[in-house]
Image (cartoon, rainbow, N blue to C red):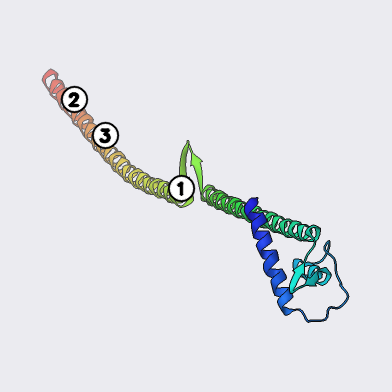
Amino acid sequence: MKNIALLTMLVALISVGDVFSQAPARREPPKGSLSSGTIDSQFVYLYAISKTQDGFEHVRQANLDRIRQNVADTIKTLTQAIADLKAKDDSQEAQVSAIADSLTQVKDELRSAQQQKDSFSVVGISLQKNTYSLIMWGIVLILAIALILYIYRYNQSHVVTQDIQKAIEELQTEFDQHRKKAMEKEQKLKRQLQDEINKRLG
């Protein structure tokens, strides 16, 4: 605080010196105020209301204290404004960081939603749609091949069955013919035997 007071006094003296060195010899009626306007205009007004004697400017202590207080207030206001700007900047930086985090989270959620859209769970196993499609088409292809093999083997077995049935029928026919011939032969032998018996008895 002491350094600020010294700095204020130094600025005031330099400003007063500049104003005095640039001021005309004849002074106009003072305009302005020590309670309003810029610091520069207040120093101009202070010079206007000060008295010159023997080449020195005489400034009232109260006016000098007022200027010093005004400079201190201005420095305090500017310091507060700088602090507010820094706080605002920090707040904006935090908001930007929060927005960046939110954007990252949204991207992650979007990626997760896309993955969920492109995949689903089957018996507790997560599968991509392409993988599921390949598996399903593979199963369909295997079933189609199995069906074709079954039909082929069924036809083959049907042909074999027909051949066997035909062979059985042929065997049955041959057996019937053989039995018929055997019966005819037996009847012929019986007749011959009967004829022989009749001849011997006759």
Q: Position of residue 24 (x, y in %)?
A: 78, 81
* Residue located 28% across and 37% down the image: 168
The reply to whether the C-beta atoms of the residues labelled 3 and 1 are less than 8 Å apart is no
The reply to whether the C-beta atoms of the residues labelled 3 and 2 are less than 8 Å apart is no
Q: Amino acid at mark 2?
A: Lys
Which residue has dot 2 on it? 190
Q: Amino acid at mark 3?
A: Asp
Which residue has dot 3 on it? 176
Q: Position of residue 62 (x, y in %)?
A: 80, 57
Mark 2 is surrounded, within 10 Å at the Cα level, by few (under 14), some (14 to 19) or many (20 or more) other residues, namely: few
Mark 1 is surrounded, within 10 Å at the Cα level, by few (under 14), some (14 to 19) or many (20 or more) other residues, namely: some
Q: Amino acid at mark 1?
A: Tyr
* Residue 85 located left or right of residue 62: left
Q: How many numbered marks have been drawn onto this rendered protein structure?
A: 3
* Residue located 21% across and 34% down the image: 178
Which residue has dot 1 on it? 132
Q: Does dot 1 land on a helix, a strand or a loop?
A: helix
Residue 50: quarter of image:
bottom right
